[in-house]
Amino acid sequence: MDIILQIFWVNILLFIWFETDAFIEYIKLLRLNIFKIKQFEEYKLINPKISYHSYIRQKHASFFTRLLTCVPCMCFWIVVIICLMFNSFYFYPIIYISSYVLYKLLRKYVY
């Protein structure tokens, strides 16, 4: 049962990061300038179809930004953190593959 719970936690975090603007809104609320939200919003006036992930990948290219904007990479690190929290590294491959496949299926058919 813990494995299913972990898979859903991973999917919730992936959904919030890749499918919503929740991160951007909370960063604006907390007034944290380290994530270049103000510059993104200015750039979005010129290019309204760009997402935050595409913007940071284009304008602030680095290993860290590529890591944050890559779904399999982000899933990998979220699963590492979730497995640490639940102390379940034995099931890491199952959780990772299941989480990633479920996210892709939900993205295709639901989001």
Image (spheres, helix red, strand yellow):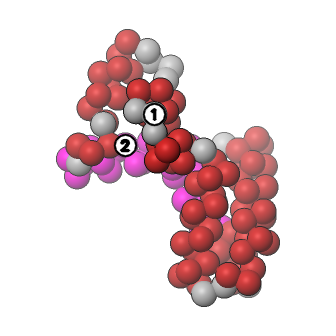
Q: Is residue 7 left or right of residue 51?
A: right
Q: Tell me the amino acid under the disc marked 1.
A: Ala
- In the picture, the disc for residue 90 is none
User: Which residue extends farthest top?
Assistant: 46
The correct choice, above or below, for 2 with respect to 27 in the image is below
Q: Position of residue 66 (x, y in %)?
A: 53, 41
Looking at the rendering, in which quadrant would you find the C terminus?
top right
The residue at 63%/58% (across/down) is 75
The residue at 76%/41% (across/down) is 108
The residue at 78%/64% (across/down) is 98
Give the CA separation, mark 1 to mark 2.
18 Å
Start and end of the magenta stretch?
A: 8-31
The correct choice, above or below, for 12 with respect to 67 in the image is below
Q: Main secondary structure of the magenta part?
A: helix
Q: Is residue 69 left or right of residue 2?
A: left
Residue 25 lies in the magenta stretch = yes
Q: Nearer the viewer, mark 1 or mark 2?
A: 1
Q: Quadrant of residue 86?
A: bottom right
Secondary structure at badge 2 equals helix
Secondary structure at badge 1 equals loop
Q: Is residue 25 left or right of residue 104?
A: left
Residue that label 2 marks: 24
Q: Quadrant of residue 19?
A: top right
Q: Position of residue 47 (x, y in %)?
A: 43, 15
Q: Tell me the amino acid under the disc marked 2.
A: Ile
| Residue 52 visible in the snapshot | no
Figure label count: 2
Residue 82 lies in the magenta stretch = no
| Residue 95 visible in the snapshot | yes
> Label 2: few (<14), some or many (≥20) within 10 Å?
some
Q: Position of residue 81 (x, y in %)?
A: 54, 72
Residue that label 1 marks: 61
